[in-house]
Amino acid sequence: MNILIVEDEYLLALELVEKLLDMDSNIRIAGQTQSVASTVEWLQQNECDLIFLDIHLSDGSSFAIFDKVKVKSPVIFTTAYDQYAIRAFQVNSIGYLLKPIDDKDLRQALNKYKETRSNFATGLDNLLDYLDKTSLPQKKYLSRIMLNLGKTQIPVNIEDVAYFMAEGRYLFAMTKSGKKYFYENTLYKLEEILDNREFFRLNRRYIINFNSIVSFTPYSKNRIKVKLFPEPGEEIIVSSEKIKEFKQWLER
């Protein structure tokens, strides 16, 4: 059984690989990718029997993969939080695993795949259609955060944050009033709890509030430069992989 693992968190991917190899001696890891772009490229050149697919990747939602390449293999999704997506998985013949991945759940997902593999492809189409049409009215997004200025903690309403920016290993929040604070979190985790109608991850370093956008202009072929307020002091570029998703987000 050849398996592709799509996961942008290195330690989580490593843990999943070890669990799979321990559970079934017939499993071979055919490939590992960390982003929408690298997964599309891999699938264009390779085939596998099964895919473990993280929903939230470094360059966007993994559902974008299905718009760019035909996925022939059954898929078992992994997710950290989304109760509505989990509900969708339960009414389709597509497996899911809730992070952190439990050994028992992983074994059950593998067994389900082996028993019903022919049903996965149909279930995947139904699942994607379900997720595309279903809103998440009961989803509770982050509304307030505690920011740090030295040893002092300051409560801030999330709508008062213009953007979040990663600088090396550290994350900062820039408020609409132009104040910069240290925030003990990661962009990856923030994506999971911010309202994606108001916030968008432009690239590996920035998550922006819609209201912080002043303008945007073509930067080079297939890229866009975004002007924000307050000024971040550097050019903010939307990568080519994100442009389509960015424009769709602007028109919501």
Image (cartoon, rainbow, N blue to C red):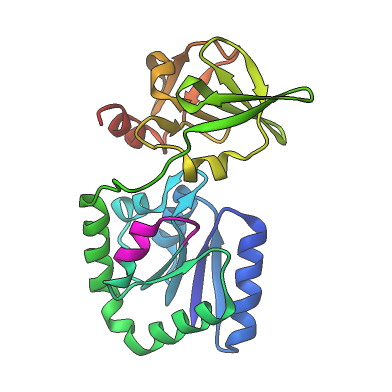
Instruction: Check the image and report above or below for 44 versus 186.
Output: below
Instruction: Find the magenta span and give its range.
Output: 79-88
In the image, what residue occupies the spot 58% across and 14% down? 232
Residue 18, x across and y down, in percent: 66, 75
Residue 97, x across and y down, in percent: 47, 69
Q: Most prominent secondary structure in the magenta stretch?
A: helix
Task: From the viewer's perspective, tell me whether residue 44 is left or right of residue 5.
Answer: left
Residue at the far right in the pictured view? 151
In the image, what residue occupies the spot 56% across and 44% down? 188
Q: In which quarter of the image is the C terminus?
A: top left
Q: Which of 32 and 164 is in front in this view?
A: 164
Residue 120, x across and y down, in percent: 30, 76
In the image, what residue occupies the spot 62% across and 72% down? 17
Number of on-image labels: 0
Q: Does the magenta stretch include residue 85?
A: yes
Task: From the viewer's perspective, tell me whether residue 163 is left or right of residue 87.
Answer: right
Residue 45, x across and y down, in percent: 43, 62
Find residue 184 and report its image quarter: top right
Task: From the viewer's perspective, tell me whether residue 110 is left or right of residue 9.
Answer: left
Q: Is residue 155 magenta?
A: no
